[in-house]
Image (tube, helix red, strand yellow):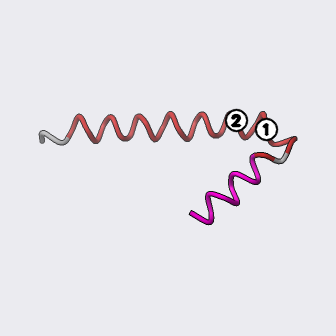
Amino acid sequence: MEDLPFAVTLLFVMFVFFSSAWIAEKFLFKTGIGKKILLWWDRV
C-alpha cells in the first residue's frame, strides 16, 4: 500500500495533462497546432 500515494499522484498528473491538452486543443484547433500534436503523439 506504500505505492498508493505515487499512484494517486500519477493519476492526478495524467488528469492535469489531459485536461490541459484538451483546453489547448480547443484554443489551438483553429491554427491546426492541435492536429500536428496529435499526429506527433500517434508516432510516439
Residue at 53 percent of width and 38 percent of height: 17
Asked if labels 1 and 2 touch by Cβ distance under 8 angstroms, the answer is: yes
Tell me the residue that label 2 is attached to. Answer: 24
Q: On the rendered image, what quadrant is the N terminus found in? A: top left
Residue neighbourhood size for the residue with mark 2, other residues' Cα within 10 Å, grouped as few (<14), some (14–19), many (≥20): few
Task: Specify the farthest residue to the bottom.
Answer: 43
Where is residue 19 drawn, in percent x and y? 58, 36
User: In what quadrant of the picture does the C terminus appear?
Assistant: bottom right
* 36 inside magenta stretch: yes
| Distance from the alpha carbon under mark 2 to that under mark 1 | 6 Å
Q: In terms of secondary structure, where does tag 1 sit?
A: helix
Asked whether 13 falls inside the magenta stretch, the response is no
Magenta residues span 34-44
Magenta region's main secondary structure?
helix
Q: Is residue 7 left or right of residue 44?
A: left
From the viewer's perspective, is residue 16 above or below residue 43?
Answer: above
Task: Name the residue at 75% across, 47% down.
Answer: 34
Residue nearer the viewer, 1 or 21: 21
- In the image, is residue 41 above or below residue 32? below
Q: Quadrant of residue 31?
A: top right
Q: Position of residue 39 (x, y in %)?
A: 70, 60
Judged left or right of residue 43, residue 5 is left
Residue at image mark 1: 28
**Residue at the image position 68 percent from the left and 55 percent from the top:** 38
x, y percent for residue 42: 62, 63
The amino acid sitting under disc 1 is Leu
Q: Which mark is residue 11?
A: none
Check disc 2 and give the amino acid type: Ala
**SS at badge 2:** helix
Q: Residues within 10 Å of mark 1 (few under 14, many from 20)?
A: some
**Is 41 left, or right, of 12 in this rendering?**
right
